[in-house]
Each structure stands twice: as structure tokens, then as C-alpha cells.
Amino acid sequence: MAGGNVLSVEGLTKRFGERLIFQDLHFGLDRGQKAALVARNGTGKSTLIKVLLGMDSPDAGTFTFAGDVRIAHLSQDHGLDLDRTILANLFAADNAAMRAIRQYEEATRGDDAEAQQSAYDAMDRADAWSYEAQAKEILGKLGLHDTDRFVDGLSGGEKRRVALAKCLIEQPDLLLLDEPTNHLDLGMIEWLESYLARAKTTLLMVTHDRFFLEVVCDTILELDNFTLHKYPGNWSYFLEKKGERSSNEHAQRDRARSIMRRELEWVRATPQARTGKSKSRLDAFQDLKSRASVRLEEDEVRLELDPARLGGKILELHKVQKAYGDKVILGGWTYHFKPGERVGLVGDNGAGKSTLIRLLTGEDKPDGGKVVIGDTIVFGHFSQEPPEFDDGMKVIEALYEIAEFMPLKKGKKLSAGQLLERFLFPRSRQHDFIAKLSGGERKRLHLLRVLMANPNFLVFDEPTNDLDVFTLGILEEFLLDFPGCLLLVSHDRYFMDKLVDHVFVLDGQGGVRDFPGNYTQYRTAADAEERVLAARKAAENKAEAEAAKASNGESAPKGDYSNRLSYNEKREYEGLEDVIAALEDEKAELEGRMAKADVDHEELMRISTRLGEVTADIEAKTERWIELDERA
């Protein structure tokens, strides 16, 4: 495909009845551009994507794609053929490489040598050999190994990953992705982030993953107040410029209100003579009134939450065992939760994160050992599968089922309506029927029902799926103020890093590692450990090879100084053991300080940050020592 413009949008407008969704949108995408569409749930992101795909029609405006552009779309509905295998779904695309692969697969099942040669030549012409190899890499990275399984028998998460693999394997010119990180584990997300950052494909995606927005995207398109604002940069640039725009809008609104007060005095003066007043000035007043009454999101006052008091005993696990057949989830784990703990739970898909949550909340029983829940504990469990709502119920009634008020400190209360407003349900929508809500809005309502019960131990299982980035920011601030315990499972690295103090890592074989630090610090340390293990393995292999040579009577050439240590390297080598020992002492001290109950949150974060740096430094210096030791 030639360079230049891939998509042009001019004056796009869409309504549902009397409700305006967006108006007069103008934007374009160039080849290779990577743009993200951000907006609050229910404000038109999915509708805009549907319009661009021809699944819905605009009320006004036009959009055009380059004539030869090939488009792939990952929707919330996977769109796969349930009666075909994974492989058949993946190779259903209509491009030269896929056609060649299908021809080759068919030819190899028969005995026609001429057909096989023709298929072989077609594979060469379409460079389908490398295409097939790349497809296998994508499938492996997304955990799709048995491609002969029928899609109908897959879990929802597996179907989603097949749909994503299909989009990537097609190598389109324009890739439209709707929440691509949903149902991926953290390792898969990190791989996808790297893959998309390198890809030459033009990208337009809807995502709440702020690491993605920071690393992958070069353009942010914000749909706000029915119109589109374009920011040529990544997520941090967007936040900076949006803050400036918000300040300007506040200033403009305040100026409009000041002028309106003077104009209001003029309009109210001698109302019996209104017909004689200047019509143009009256029209200008109406315009001024609309600008002055614009509601801008104000900085919220921090909540002083007052959940039920945590007693001396919170939650204890005593040699807990759990397995499903040969799959061991916990092999005798003991842990006692302390007041105010904020823990992240990580592990590959299938490692047992959801099982552990059910054990902790008493929804499931261990095979051995026991789980002791304190008498004062009130769990707030936000599950991946939200409850079925009565579509004939109104939004505010769903909260009234739980409580009408949430208690705050000093005897204050937060009403159900105020909590809804705080989480972006304005009063104008609180009496809407639930049937009108989008998927993301229903998820947000489920979240508020959990919070409205005023728990003192929050258990969140993937709370960020289908929540927009603005709601996530509000939820983060809410949880930072939450004085109880928090256990969090999330593939959103930004969200987890901001909220947790340590991480439980499930190894999938019954073991649980307690890492002191947030997710990014854990990944940094884990990567360093992997490099050290790889270096040790390489050293062992080298030693074995040299031993084998020696046993065969071979010897290294004399007088070869090419790989000997230099004077400076020898000094470095001799001093590294002392440096590593000092770092190990500092690490032990930091872990001891982190374990103390009287450390405040800010100090805990400083300790956690330094601990991550020290751990990474230990691994890097250990790896360097191994390298120098091999040569010494």
C-alpha cells in the first residue's frame, strides 16, 4: 500500500433519537500512525467505530478510506465461526499469503504432484513461509497451542485471544482494536505492547491500558462533550495538554458568568419594555448563558471513608491446600493478613488466581488446612462476572437495594446519588432504566454496589475491564483513600502499580511468592533473575564443552590473551562481591522496614521504590560478576 492518508473523516454527526452522540467530527489517520480513542463509557466510542466499519450510518458527514486499504477489526464480540477449528478461523482471511497457505494445505492432503508444486510456488511468490512462521509465533505468545480445537468449545477468554491472533496474522493496513488487553495475562499484554509498537500497521484502538497509551500510541483522540480533540503525543502528553485545556475552559466559563451577571441585570430591567430591547443583544445573552452554564468536572474533595473497624484477626491461611485433579493451586500455604494491606495477585492464566479469591472469601473450601476469617470482616467482592440486573430498574434504585447512604468520618454521609455523580453518573441519568446502559456503565454500576455496602476488605478481580480511563482515575483516588485491606487481580499494570505495596505471585505449581514491591518492580527483578539464570546456564554449558575438549586431548591455544581481564576489569571483579554483599544488607533492611506496621503510606512507597532499585542492582551486578568470573 502506498503512503499517505489511510482514513479521512469530515463533519461526522450521529444521534440516537433526540440524544446527540457526537457532532461535526474531523480527523484523519496517516499510514503507520498509532492513535487511541478515549472517552467516558457511554459517550460514543463504540458507535464511532461501528460507523467507520459500516455497521451503523451517520446522520451527517462523510468518511473515506484509501482505495487499497485492508482493515481488520477486533470487537468485543469475537465474530468467529464456532463450527470451525482455531486454525480454520485464523486462515480464513482473503490475502495472497492466506490463499497460498490454504492451497498448500489442500495440495499436501492429495497425491497430485503437479498441484503440490504449484502450491509450493504460490507459497514462494506470496512469501507465505515467513507468514506461517509469524502466525505460529503469535499463536504461541497468546497461549494458543492446540489449533485443532473447535472454537465452540473454547472459553470466552480463549475466543477473544483467537480473534486477536486472527487480526494480527492478517497483517492489515489498518487495525481497529476494541479493548485488546481484555482476557490477556500480564505476560501476553507486555508482548502485545512490544509487537504493536514495532508494527508498521496503522492503528486505531479503544483501550483503558495506560501503559499501552504511553508506549504504543503517538496520537490521542478524545471524544468529549460531543466533539473530538486531537493530541499529537502519548498518554502523558495528553494529560498535560488536557490539563491546560481544562484550565482555559474554566477561565472562559468564569468570564462568561461574570459578563452574564451584568447582562442579566439588563435583561431583567423594565421587563415591560422587553420588546424594545435589542434582539441581537438578547440573542447574544442566550449564547452567553449556554457558555456560562457548561458543567466542567471539578476537583473532587477527598472522601474520608469510614468502613467497619478491622478487628485483631483479619484473614488467616493455615497450610492451605487446593488442587483440581493433577493441577495443584496451593501446596500448603500459610499467610496472615495485616490491617491496611494492599496486595496484588499475579500469575499466568490458569495459575489459580480466581480459585484463591474464592478460598479467601469463603466461597470455596480448601482440600487441606484452613482459612480463618475475622469476625469483623465485611468483604466487598467485585467479580469478573457482574450480577444480572433487572433492566426495568432505574440506576439509582440499584444502589438503593444496597443502601441509601455511605457513612463517612465525623458523622457525615455520602448519598447514593452523590456516589453516582462522583463516578460519572450525572443526576440527569440516575433515573434512566438500566436497559439503556452500555456494557461499561453496567460494570461501573456493579462496582458502586460493591462500594455502597461499605466493606472493610475489598477483593477486586479484574475491575478495570470495560472501564474507561477517566473512571479508572476516579477509582484509583477512591481506593488510595480506602483505609481497609485490598486484594487486587488486574492486568492493568498502571492501576496495580499505583495501589499495591506487595505482590503474591502464583507459580502454577502450588507455590506462592510474596514479593515486596509493586508489579513493575517485580517484573524488573524477575527479568534480572532470568538473565542471571541464563548467564549461569551459558557458563555451565561452556564449562562442559571445555571439559569435553580436554577429555579429547584438546587444549586452548597458548598465548591467547584476547579474552583475558583488563587491569580495570580485574579490579572491578575483585570488588563486586563486597558491593553485592552491601546491597544484600540494604535489601534485608528495607524488607524489615516494610514489614513494620507503623510505616505510613508515603514512606512505604519510598521504601518500595528503593527496594525495587536495589533488587535490580543486585541482579545486574551478579550477572556482571558471573561474566567476569567466566573470563577470569
Image (tube, rainbow, N blue to C red):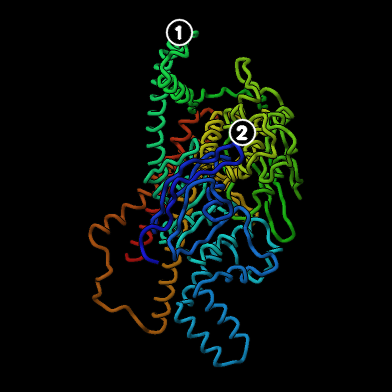
Q: Is residue 149 left or right of residue 4?
A: right
Cα distance, mark 1 to mark 2? Answer: 60 Å
Quarter of the picture holding the N terminus: bottom left
Crowding around mark 1 (Cα neighbors within 10 Å: few <14, some 14 to 19, many 20+) is few
Residue at label 2?
485
Q: Is residue 129 above or below residue 474?
A: below
Expressed as whole percent of the image width and height from the top left, the position of residue 148 reads: 65, 71
518, 132: nearer the viewer: 132
**Amino acid under disc 2:** Cys
**Quarter of the image where the C terminus is located:** bottom left
* Percent position of residue 398, x then y: 71, 32
* Residue at figure coordinates x 24%, y 57% from the top left: 568
Query: Is there any visible trace of residue 521 in the rendered image?
Result: no
Say which residue appears at 56% left-offset and 81% top-offset. 103
60 sits left or right of 284 in the view: right
Q: The residue under label 1 is which amino acid type?
A: Ala
Examine the rendered structure and indicate whether residue 168 appears above or below residue 240.
below
The numbered mark at residue 619 is none
Residue depicted at 36% across the width and 57% down the height: 624
Residue 2 position within the rendered picture, expressed as x and y whole percent measured from the top left: 37, 65
Residue 233 visible at all: yes
| Residue that carries the numbered disc 1 in the rendered image | 269
In terms of secondary structure, where does tag 2 sit?
A: strand
**As drawn, which residue projects farthest toward the front?**
276
Sequence order check, earlier mark of 1 and 2: 1
At a point 58% along the width and 49% down the height, the residue shown is 346
Residue 231 lies, in percent from the top left, at: 39, 43
